[in-house]
Image (tube, helix red, strand yellow):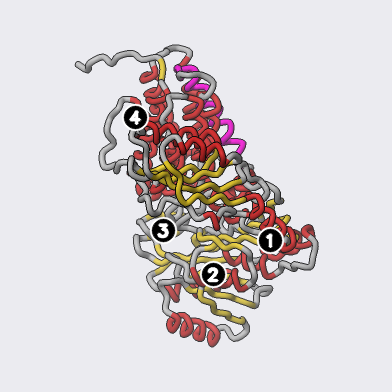
Amino acid sequence: MAAAHTIKTHITASVMKRMFIAGGKMLEVNKAQVDALNVFPVPDGDTGTNMSLTMMSAVKEISLINSTSMAELAEKLSKGALRGARGNSGVILSQILKGFSNIIAQNDECDARTFAKGLREGAELAYRAVSKPKEGTILTVVRSMAEEAIDTAKRTTDIQKLMNAILEKGQETLAKTPDMLDVLKRAGVVDSGGFGLITLFKGLIMGYLDQEITGAEEYAEPESDKPQSIDSAFPDDSDLIVDYESLGELDFGYCTEFFITNIKKRTTITDIDKLREYLCEIGNSVICIGDLNLIKVHVHTNTPGKALTKALTLGELDKVKIENMMEQNRQLRARYEAERKPIGLLAVCSGDGFSAIFKDLLVDQVIEGGQTMNPSAEDIASAARKINAENIIILPNNKNIILSAEQSRTLVQKRNIFVLQTKDIPQGLAAVLNFNPEASLSENLENMTTAFSCVDAGQVTYAVRDTVIDKFVIKKGDIIGLDKGTIVTSGKNVEAVTTKLIVSMLNEDKEVVTLYYGQDVTEEKAEAFVESLQEKYPDIEFILHYGGQPLYYYVLSVE
């Protein structure tokens, strides 16, 4: 006979923190299983990886909290997930957490009804994050879980019963997703995002019960929080302005540095701690380290005299240095304004060859990202902030990065962000080739959109598992050719599958085929293959470039 559990009706901030740390660990441990549910059997580090990275960004933020404030926990959870959101699944997860955080922040403790309302708010925000929501996805799963939560919270105040009911409903809905999306049924899988959400929720329950998650590694503290050497504690203020967005917005104007020597006999370690607390009150970027022999201090403040006066109560001052950061900022601002241009470009791509091509085409910022690693909204925003332009055009070049690119707009200030819906790298290159720095923003947006919309892109990769999809019976390791994300050919030979893919994409209006070979294809082999294609199809022009992309033998465009 099972032992009855103790009924608990509220979740404290410390328990909620433990729950989400456990949820993050559960996702991390099981991300490979979530990835394996991709509809197409291509080696994309996709849903599980993206949801795990998003969640671990949130975990990083909440792990640093020392207070028992539910409002602070909610704020850190929401902001951490937003900044770490990667891929469509990560963006959706960040919105679920944002809605949940908005509700739980309103009280010191979370009861069953508050938990349910938070889940409902998260589901609603998640739906709003997607322009064309599809049923049979993570959205359906979270909505059904939220509905169950609201219904169950009317009948019980028991938190454990509530969460068990929510989990059971979520699993039931997940099992039905193949009946809602035909593509899932044909592939013989449930929705990977929904499975990821269930995985996270299992972790929440284990965290609530204070159970260990088998195989999960302990969360490592960020490097910045580890003890610093007294010889390397000063930050480099030459990098004070890390991006153009921060120019002209200094909260504190004087970089103040000094040592405290000949420490007074009555000074204690507690006095050093109190000095550090005082410096945090009058400034930021505070470093106050050392012992009763030597103390090193760094602070950005508007009142350096107060910092020096306080320090004198502990001992003598040595090597005092005060720099006017406002003057440095004014000089940088003047140079920034003089060099500012009307339009800048940011491209996302995977492969050193593709990166070099975009840079040769004078794209301002190129960041790594693609099938195996989707950059977060904060990654994209950070790169955008480094572009000295009034308007920035972002080329995601992957359908799973578009939502993150759109979300990055909320993280960038003082410039206009425009996201072109480029779904692959050939589309991105076509858009860049039609960019004219002398033309207006509206002309460029129109011309670039028209250009990439006319590009048909294909990809050649390998299957990571056995599957049956449409008319294809595919075995693990088979070579597969995709046209606009749909499998159109498969086989055992890379060149044969690539040739079939090209032929399937050609028509009387197409006369140029551009191939980009990946890191697993040698230059000699690629050149020999293109020569054979040119001989076989003399009326078609074949162009070869090095893309350097992982996992995909060839990426190609037909125009």
The image quadrant where one finds the C terminus is: bottom right
- Provide residue 246's location: percent of width, then percent of height: 63, 49
Disc 3 residue type? Answer: Pro
Of circles 3 and 4, which is in front? 4
Mark 1 → mark 3, Cα distance in angstroms: 32 Å
The residue shown at (19%, 16%) is 1
Of circles 3 and 2, which is in front? 2
149 above or below 66?
A: above
Alpha-carbon neighbours of circle 4 within 10 Å: few (<14), some, or many (≥20)?
A: many
Q: Nearer the viewer, residue 403 or 134?
A: 403
Q: What's the mark number on residue 207?
A: 4
Disc 1 residue type? Answer: Gly
Q: Nearer the viewer, residue 471 or 391?
A: 391
369 above or below 66?
A: below
Q: Main secondary structure of the magenta part?
A: helix
Q: Which residue is mark 3?
A: 43
The residue shown at (42%, 49%) is 49
Magenta-drawn segment = 110-130
Q: What's the mark number on residue 354?
A: 2
